[in-house]
Image (tube, grey):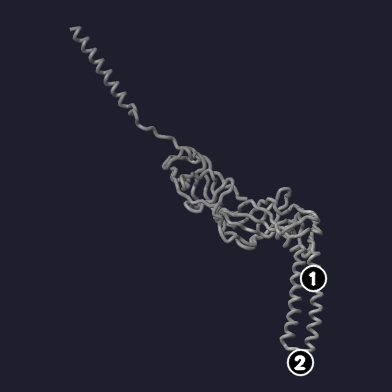
Amino acid sequence: MRITNLLISILLLILTACGGKDKKDSTQTIPGSPAKQAPISVDAIIAKTQTLVTDIEVPGSLLANETTEIHPEVSGRLVQLNVKEGTFVSRGALLAKLYDGDLQAQKRKVEVQLKIAEQTENRQNQLLKIQGISQQEYDLSLLQVHNLKADIDIINEAIRKTEIRAPFSGKLGFKNISPGAFINPATILCTISQVSQLKLQFTVPEKYSSKIKNGQNVDFTVDGSLKTNHAHVSATEVFIEENTRSLSVRAVVISQDPYLIPGAFAKVKIELGQDNLAIMIPTESVIPIGRKKQIYLFKSGKAMTMDITTGVRDSSRIQVLSGLNIGDTVITTGLLFLKTGSDIKISKVNPLIPLP
């Protein structure tokens, strides 16, 4: 009897223990079930409009208004050279002279022949009036006079070609020859540049080509000078360069500065226009995905992606042309940890930095 009661007591204890274990196990979390993630803390900005002055900076070069190499028109020995390096000369100034002694001798010979021919023509004219000679005989003597005059004109032109003159007023460069040298049309005596008026040449990317207009003002600086110089656009090339996809532009320099020398490198700044309703966001808030660009917006505690179209940019901000509305909340931090539908909370709303 005692053994029976003892067995019953042990069985009751075992059943009680098993029931408690099952109850305890039923309250535990099922293995593999996801735990609820805490919201991600991020910073954001509120999209609003700003006044955007669009400008670009491009490299350029200064050019003389006119520049050319001085060549002789004919071959010959140089007997006179009036090139003083670095000096200014006026248009038509005699720079060099070739030997023309043989031409001068030919001219004197023909002038004597012309004098005799004119005397003969004068006498025959008197005879023609009294019908002492025929009209044909007089015409032949008159033809001889005209031929000799034409010969003198040819010789004078040949003599003119032995004189090398300045084609325009300007500054002379270095001379490359000395008196006594035999030169030909391929010989470069020196260069001459019209530096009283300078031109500025530069290129702009193809996407800005439609914004460049004749008369438009541009600013530029050169190395060695802190002064900002000014010019206005005078002409644009008629085509886009295929290799660089850029448009060549020339401007007339208005400023006067001793640092402005032909060939000098210039930093050109061009103002392309002003937009009073531009929406600007920080560049770090834009996510490039292939050829598209996306941003994360805060909507009802969730992160939502939005495709956008961008415009001009500077070192810290980029313009949004489409895909973003005024008043939208743009997430600017923690982008690597976000995906569409992520729970987020805004820890700080940063103010927009005013545009310069």
Query: Toward the viewer: 135 or 191?
Result: 135
- Residue 3 shown left or right of residue 203 in the figure: left
Task: Pinpoint residue 297: horizontal percent, then vertical percent.
Answer: 47, 46
Residue annotated with mark 1: 107
Callouts 2 and 1 close, C-beta under 8 Å: no
**Residue plotted at (78% across, 86% down):** 124
User: Does residue 216 appear in the picture of this structure?
Assistant: yes
Crowd rating for badge 2 (residues with CA inside 10 Å; few <14, some 14–19, many 20+): few
Query: Toward the viewer: 9 or 66?
Result: 66
Amino acid residing under circle 2 = Gln
Task: Pinpoint residue 164: horizontal percent, then vertical percent.
Answer: 76, 62
What is the residue that sits farthest to the top in this orientation? 2
Residue annotated with mark 2: 131
- Residue 35 shown left or right of residue 20 in the figure: right
Q: Secondary structure at mark 1?
A: helix
Task: Pinpoint residue 170: horizontal percent, then vertical percent.
Answer: 76, 60
Against 319, is 165 above or below?
below
Alpha carbon distance from label 2 to label 1: 35 Å
Q: Nearer the viewer, mark 2 or mark 1?
A: 2
